[in-house]
Image: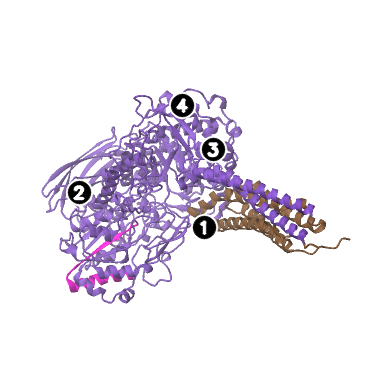
């Protein structure tokens, strides 16, 4: 049995990226079921983008943990970054009109809560993207 | 070591690649998203993504409308001049013991008291806001600046004191972009409370202990009291509407606080010692509770000045100095206690017990006051007290305890004698013609307002059929020119007789259903009066009543003429002006339609027994929920869809129909046949902030603007033509000092209505029409035609009055003034936008009689008489149905009965479900207020049912789409948006600077990504070499 490798800074940042992306996904999905945004449904590029980013990031960590820092794995954080940024762009796109409407004419406790949920989701999404960029500069495992 | 270094490099290039690739992805996504928001981006950045290229043929005249002004300086001078005159004629003198006008000497010793003298409310917030202009040919001014420019000398001690306390006069307004702080009073946000920020005497003493002594040298004390106005804001009636942390004995947000009382009393006390004068200015649009000021003998005069805009204070200064004689009259009743009106019994946030945000089902507002809104309540109840009928008196009700100043009231520095010489009713021509003699019997020159009222018979038939009658109602009005002392003038007023008909929902009509306008048999009293109360007193005098019967004052029968109708008339107005048989269209607006016997509407047959209770905690029934879920039109396969033509090649462009006003002209159908189905579906879906180009017929983008206090959405220069090489007569030089001028500067709507001058309203339309020509801004959501149901609606500043007729004629005059210059001035919000509380989703319930005789009558003339080419619908529901889905209101009344042929936009509804696109198009709405990319997929993404496949099988909806395109383009063709466009014009796309910037970013990040990848592999190669 191959011994577990020693984790480096990149590992912990990757885990943090996954957690924040997961939080973004959860906030988005909850927001899609909120009273105000329920009718808009789930946008595939937002949910799909974040989900793909999470999966790829997990795969990246596992592969590096298991197989070491192979060159081919270096493409994975790039893919994660692309997925998160596309998701973030589309997240803004599908919510901006609703937020504008709530802030102008439909402000009440419920709609404000729904709007805040959307904004938190966006912030988490872009935070995950930024963290992923930072993570990509670090190693997942320590070199022998 | 080398290996480790190379590994480091690999990490760095991997990181850089991730960063650049991520940013590349973001910019590419942004590029795709930009098209969906292009309209909004262009509006905010001042860019244009399309333009029209035109090559005029020899001799071809491309510009059909002519400005009255040669340049922007003349244009702005005209706006400034009108703004000044609006407050000269629109300020209402409510009380004057002879203190006014001020002598020239007195204008040199003026003390401005009350912080609102220095920090006044000049416009609303978030809509109808004052555009502050600096460095232009018509800079806006505040009160101090305006008065000083008129030669007034202001107490410097007080000015210094108040300006030193500036930070304490901060007030917050809840705006779309967050909470904004202003140095003046503001209206509370929804659910908020009013906080009085008037300075206490203690704080003033701390600021300048000698301020009271300074009043001796400046003993003309002008105290300004203010209340703000705002969209999306609201005053809550009674103590609940006042900040509970303040202990200032304020019983209502529109009533006075102790600090306001104190500043008045300080002036009154000072007057006792300095032999000066105390004048109170009311700087408000919602009627305040001022009975204590009226009764305060120490207060010499009260002048209502509204929200004076950018130039109105010049007018106020001129009125106080007697340079101009006041001639304004109140547009609203100033009640002793606003919360005691029947309408106020149902004014609040009354949530359905089964509210559901996912369908915008929130609250219900039952307007149980019936037709008795404003003075129609106070004067009718008063009349019934005198006539001893309808349980009106109830042993408690006393007019003077209810009303401080009645609707239509206003004083002058001179006196006038009005005589009603003759009244002629011609039902065939639908007119009531009154001849009035007006004589200036005083010592000063001035203008006078003639208010023509009517009192209708209230019969046993009415009681049986629940037809209500106001004891007095305004029928029409006119205003004299300036009359010199002793001068007499004859004024002829030709009123619309339909304004004295009553809607009887039970009457079997010509259409074979129920609902009709009726005229009861009996005596009709036509009366003049300085306000509704004097008019009703004159009527009561004609009926033999006097002070002995409980009247507040004996009436004058010389001001009354009668007309006898021997037989009940149900035919004269059975058909509308378009020839359509009228019938009930709004039965579902009565809550009793869904929930029988739930609502008791107020009736003068039994005031006490029908006094409105508060209708709250309503549970929507299953039947109501089926409508409240906003899905009332089902797209089906019906009719012969193939027979409806789209995308034909008939060789016409919209320019071929420039100025063709006959909508039956065959060329219109030929032109509309050229529009493709996709174009129709995109244009109806995405009409926010501007109509977009339609390439098949070369229909231009037409910019929409908010108002109503003037074009305040964009600066004069944003869409102006600055190409000095073009033939456009309205080219503006890029370095024109007025390029950044914004025209949201006019006195607010109540001031315009307080002028009681159709001429001034017309002038406002004309000057905005001229502005429209120079600025290339055509559509103006500028005529606020909702009524002041209660004073608590903080948005009342955008609407004219509590009275429908005054609203109707001011709006119609405004619309017609703009139309002369090709400007589409559109009434809004059609209809029943009576509160800002929960307006997206709010269910408004009322009787059809109330709807037709109040709110709808306030819009009717703008359509029927002025031929409005645009209208904006409302957020609220009509009963349970979204306003945009109400076929009876939008199609049957507005288009069929009244003959509206123009474009119709939704308000700023961004909730796709609530925008009800398919229902709205079916009801004649020509565009929603959404924006998006110019392709059908973008529209379908918002409204999944809005696909070519779906819609193309529904012949009804296809015809609706063609109608929408006809009305939309008919309006544009008859506007100045077509100036400069000819049949050979072409629409071209323009790459904006932000398109280029985004492309540059995409290329840069792409190159950087490639470079990073290369560097990554190079680092790998070195590693392998090692």
Specify the label residue B721 is tagged with: none
Discs 4 and 2 share one subunit: yes
- Which image quarter is the C terminus of chain B in? bottom right
Residue tagged 1: A108
Residue, disc 4: B671
* Closest to the observer, B413 or B309: B309
Q: How far apart are the alpha carbons under marks 1 and 3? A: 33 Å
Q: Quadrant of residue B95?
A: bottom left
Label at residue B448: 2
- Percent from the top left, x then y, of residue B723? 38, 38
| Chain that the image shows in brown | A
Q: Color of chain B here?
A: purple
Say which element carries label 3.
loop
Which mark is nearer the camera, 2 or 3?
A: 3
Give the residue number, with chain letter if any, for mark 3.
B934
> Marks 4 and 2, Cα distance to the nearest angstrom?
50 Å
* Image mark 2: chain: B
Circle nearer the N terminus (4, 3):
4
From the top left corner, tell me how far across and down residue B959 is, in percent: 51, 30
Q: Position of residue B33 (x, y in %)?
A: 57, 45
Where residue A118 sits, quadrant-wise, is: bottom right
* Label 4 to label 3: alpha-carbon separation: 21 Å
Mark 2 is surrounded, within 10 Å at the Cα level, by few (under 14), some (14 to 19) or many (20 or more) other residues, namely many
* Magenta stretch encompasses residue A141: no
Report if residue B273 lies within the magenta region: yes
Image quarter of residue B400:
bottom left
């Amino acid at each position: 049995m191959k011994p577990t490798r020693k984790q480096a800074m990149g590992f912990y940042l990757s885990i943090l990226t996954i957690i924040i992306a997961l939080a973004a996904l959860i906030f988005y999905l909850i927001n899609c079921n909120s009273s105000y945004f329920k009718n808009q449904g789930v946008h595939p590029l937002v949910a799909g983008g974040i989900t793909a980013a999470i999966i790829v990031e997990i795969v990246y960590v596992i592969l590096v943990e298991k197989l070491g820092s192979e060159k081919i794995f270096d493409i994975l954080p790039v893919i994660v970054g692309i997925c998160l940024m596309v998701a973030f762009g589309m997240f803004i796109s599908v919510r901006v009109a609703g937020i504008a409407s709530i802030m102008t004419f439909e402000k009440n406790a419920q709609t404000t809560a729904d709007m805040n949920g959307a904004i938190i989701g966006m912030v988490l999404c872009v935070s995950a993207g930024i963290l992923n960029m930072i993570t990509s500069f670090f190693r997942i495992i320590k070199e022998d | 070591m080398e290996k480790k270094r190379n590994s480091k490099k690999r990490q760095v290039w991997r990181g850089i690649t991730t960063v650049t690739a991520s940013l590349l992805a973001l910019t590419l996504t942004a590029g795709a998203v930009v098209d969906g928001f292009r309209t909004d981006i262009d509006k905010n950045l001042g860019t244009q993504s399309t333009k029209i290229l035109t090559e005029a043929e020899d001799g071809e005249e491309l510009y059909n409308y002519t400005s009255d002004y040669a340049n922007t300086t003349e244009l702005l001078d005209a706006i400034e001049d009108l703004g000044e005159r609006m407050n000269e004629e629109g300020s209402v003198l409510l009380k004057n013991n002879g203190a006014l006008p001020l002598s020239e000497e007195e204008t040199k010793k003026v003390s401005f008291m009350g912080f609102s003298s220095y920090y006044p409310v000049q416009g609303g917030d978030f809509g109808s806001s004052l555009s502050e202009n600096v460095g232009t040919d018509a800079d806006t001014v505040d009160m101090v600046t305006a008065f000083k420019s008129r030669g007034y000398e202001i107490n410097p001690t007080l000015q210094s004191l108040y300006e030193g306390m500036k930070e304490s006069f901060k007030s917050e307004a809840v705006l779309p972009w967050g909470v904004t702080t202003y140095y003046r009073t503001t209206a509370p946000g929804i659910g908020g409370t009013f906080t009085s920020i008037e300075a206490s005497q203690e704080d003033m003493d701390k600021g300048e202990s000698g301020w009271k002594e300074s009043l001796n040298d400046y003993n003309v004390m002008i105290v300004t009291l203010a209340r703000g106005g705002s969209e999306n804001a609201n005053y809550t009636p009674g103590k609940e509407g006042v900040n509970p942390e303040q202990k200032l004995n304020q019983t209502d947000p529109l009533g006075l606080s102790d600090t306001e009382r104190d500043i008045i009393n300080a002036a009154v006390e000072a007057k006792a010692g300095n032999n000066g004068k105390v004048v109170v200015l009311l700087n408000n649009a919602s009627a305040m509770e001022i009975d204590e000021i009226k009764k305060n003998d120490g207060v010499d005069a009260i002048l209502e000045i509204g929200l004076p805009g950018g130039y109105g204070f010049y007018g106020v200064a001129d009125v106080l100095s007697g340079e101009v004689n006041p001639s304004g009259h109140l547009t609203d009743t100033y009640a002793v206690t606003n919360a005691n009106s029947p309408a106020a019994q149902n004014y609040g946030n009354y949530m359905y017990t089964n509210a559901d945000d996912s369908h915008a089902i929130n609250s219900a507002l039952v307007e149980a006051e019936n037709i008795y809104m404003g003075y129609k309540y106070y004067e009718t109840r008063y009349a019934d007290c005198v006539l001893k009928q309808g349980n009106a008196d109830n042993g408690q009700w006393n007019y003077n305890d209810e009303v401080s100043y009645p609707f239509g009231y206003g004083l002058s520095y001179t006196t006038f004698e009005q005589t009603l010489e003759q009244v002629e009713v011609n039902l065939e021509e639908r007119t009531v013609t009154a001849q009035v003699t007006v004589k200036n019997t005083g010592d000063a020159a001035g203008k006078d307002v003639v208010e023509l009222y009517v009192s209708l018979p209230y019969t046993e038939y009415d009681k049986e059929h629940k037809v209500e009658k106001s004891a007095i109602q305004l029928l029409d009005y006119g205003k004299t020119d300036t009359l010199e002392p002793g001068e007499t003038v004859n004024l002829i007023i030709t009123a619309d007789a339909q304004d004295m008909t009553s809607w009887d929902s039970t009457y079997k009509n010509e259409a074979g259903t129920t609902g009709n306008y009726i005229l009861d048999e009996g005596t009709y009293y036509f009366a003049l009066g300085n306000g509704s109360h004097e008019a009703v007193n004159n009527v009561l005098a004609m009926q033999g009543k006097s002070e002995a019967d409980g009247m507040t004052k004996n009436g004058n029968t010389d001001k009354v003429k009668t007309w006898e109708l021997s037989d009940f008339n149900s035919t004269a107005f059975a058909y509308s002006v378009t020839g359509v048989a009228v019938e009930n269209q709004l039965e579902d607006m009565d809550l009793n339609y869904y929930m029988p016997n739930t609502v008791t509407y107020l009736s003068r047959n039994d005031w006490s027994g029908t006094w409105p209770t508060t209708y709250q905690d309503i549970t929507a029934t299953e039947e109501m929920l089926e409508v409240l879920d906003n899905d009332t039109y089902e797209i089906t396969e019906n009719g012969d869809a193939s027979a409806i033509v789209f995308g034909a090649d008939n060789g016409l462009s919209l320019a071929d129909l420039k100025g063709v006003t006959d909508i039956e002209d065959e060329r219109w159908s030929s032109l509309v046949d050229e529009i493709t189905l996709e174009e129709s579906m995109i244009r109806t879906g995405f009409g926010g902030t501007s109509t977009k180009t339609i390439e098949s017929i070369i229909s231009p983008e037409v910019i929409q603007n908010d108002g109503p206090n003037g074009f305040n959405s964009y600066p004069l220069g944003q869409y102006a033509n600055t190409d000095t090489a073009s033939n456009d007569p309205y080219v503006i030089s890029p370095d024109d000092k007025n390029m950044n001028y914004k025209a949201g500067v006019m006195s607010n709507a109540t001031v315009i209505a307080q002028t009681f001058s159709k001429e001034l309203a017309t002038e406002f339309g004309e000057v905005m029409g001229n502005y429209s020509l120079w600025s290339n801004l055509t559509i103006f959501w500028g005529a606020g035609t909702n009524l002041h149901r209660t004073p608590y609606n903080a948005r009342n500043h955008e609407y004219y009055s509590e009275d429908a007729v005054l609203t109707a004629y001011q709006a119609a005059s405004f619309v017609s003034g703009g139309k002369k210059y090709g400007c589409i001035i559109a009434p809004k919000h059609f209809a029943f936008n009576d509160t800002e509380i929960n307006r997206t989703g709010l269910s408004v319930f009322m009787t059809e009689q109330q709807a037709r005789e109040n709110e709808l009558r306030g819009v009717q003339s703008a359509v029927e008489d002025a031929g409005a080419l645009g209208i904006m619908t409302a957020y609220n529901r009509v009963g349970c149905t979204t306003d945009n889905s109400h076929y009876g209101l939008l199609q049957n009344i507005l288009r069929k009965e009244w003959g509206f042929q123009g474009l119709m936009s939704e308000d700023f509804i961004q909730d796709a479900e609530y925008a009800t696109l398919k229902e709205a198009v079916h009801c004649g709405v020509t565009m929603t207020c959404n924006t998006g990319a110019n392709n059908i997929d973008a529209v379908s993404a918002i409204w999944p049912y809005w696909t070519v496949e779906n819609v193309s099988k529904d012949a009804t909806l296809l015809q609706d789409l063609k109608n929408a395109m006809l009305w939309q383009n008919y309006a544009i063709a008859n506007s100045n948006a077509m100036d400069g466009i000819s049949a050979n014009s072409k629409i071209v796309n323009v790459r904006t600077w932000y398109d280029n910037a985004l492309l540059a970013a995409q290329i840069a990040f792409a190159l950087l990504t490639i470079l990073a990848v290369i560097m990554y592999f190079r680092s790998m190669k070195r590693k392998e070499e090692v």
